[in-house]
């Protein structure tokens, strides 16, 4: 692990109890993720990109739709996004959430 990552984790954990006193301290991983969203450490754009990328992979693995275009069309309707937005996320962000 690099020193920047270690320092970031250290600061996040050190500040977590004092920041979370404003709201009830999360007791689960889900509540902690909500905390990260509330303090805007995780952006809505990253949430959308993550959701689109992983939902697409899941639907394709399940063979839920006949082809890529049908999958994209269904996702666009489900997420209230334009089909081109889905295509662009898949094209431009496909490596964004992969472990390095």
Image: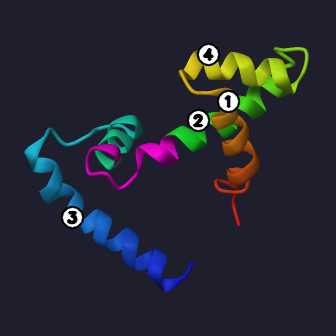
- The vertical placement of 73 against 24, above or below, is above
The x and y percentages for residue 20 are 17, 49
The magenta region covers 37-47
Query: Label 4: how many residues lie within 10 Å, few (<14), some (14-19) or many (20+)?
Result: few
Q: CA distance from mark 4 to mark 1?
A: 13 Å
Residue at 35% over, 56% down: 41
Quarter assignment of residue 67? top right
* Disc 3 element: helix
Pick the front one: 99 or 28: 99
Query: Label 1: how many residues lie within 10 Å, few (<14), some (14-19) or many (20+)?
Result: some
Q: CA distance from mark 2 to mark 3?
A: 28 Å
* Residue 64 placement, left or right of 93: right
- The vertical placement of 2 against 93, above or below, is below
Task: Tell me whether circle 2 and circle 1 mark residues in contact (CB < 8 Å).
Answer: yes
Residue under label 4:
77
Counting residues from the N terminus, which is met first, the one under dot 4 or under dot 1?
1
Q: Disc number at residue 55?
A: 1
Residue at 40% over, 40% down: 29
* Residue 37 placement, left or right of 24: right
Query: Label 2: how many residues lie within 10 Å, few (<14), some (14-19) or many (20+)?
Result: few
- The vertical placement of 97 against 60, above or below, is below
Q: CA distance from mark 3 to mark 4?
A: 39 Å
Residue at 16% over, 55% down: 19
> Which one is closest to the eye, mark 3 or mark 4?
4
- The vertical placement of 27 against 59, above or below, is below
The x and y percentages for residue 97 are 64, 53
Most extreme residue toward the right is: 66
> Which one is closest to the eye, mark 2 or mark 4?
4
Q: CA distance from mark 3 to mark 1?
A: 33 Å
């Amino acid at each position: 692990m690099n020193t920047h990552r270690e320092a970031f984790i250290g600061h996040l954990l050190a500040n977590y109890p004092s920041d979370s006193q404003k709201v009830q301290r999360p007791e689960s991983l889900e509540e902690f993720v909500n905390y990260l969203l509330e303090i805007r450490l995780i952006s809505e754009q990253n949430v959308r990109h993550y959701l689109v990328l992983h939902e697409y992979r899941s639907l394709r693995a399940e063979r839920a739709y006949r082809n890529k275009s049908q999958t994209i069309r269904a996702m666009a309707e489900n997420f209230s996004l334009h089909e081109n937005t889905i295509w662009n996320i898949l094209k431009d962000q496909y490596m964004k959430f992969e472990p390095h």
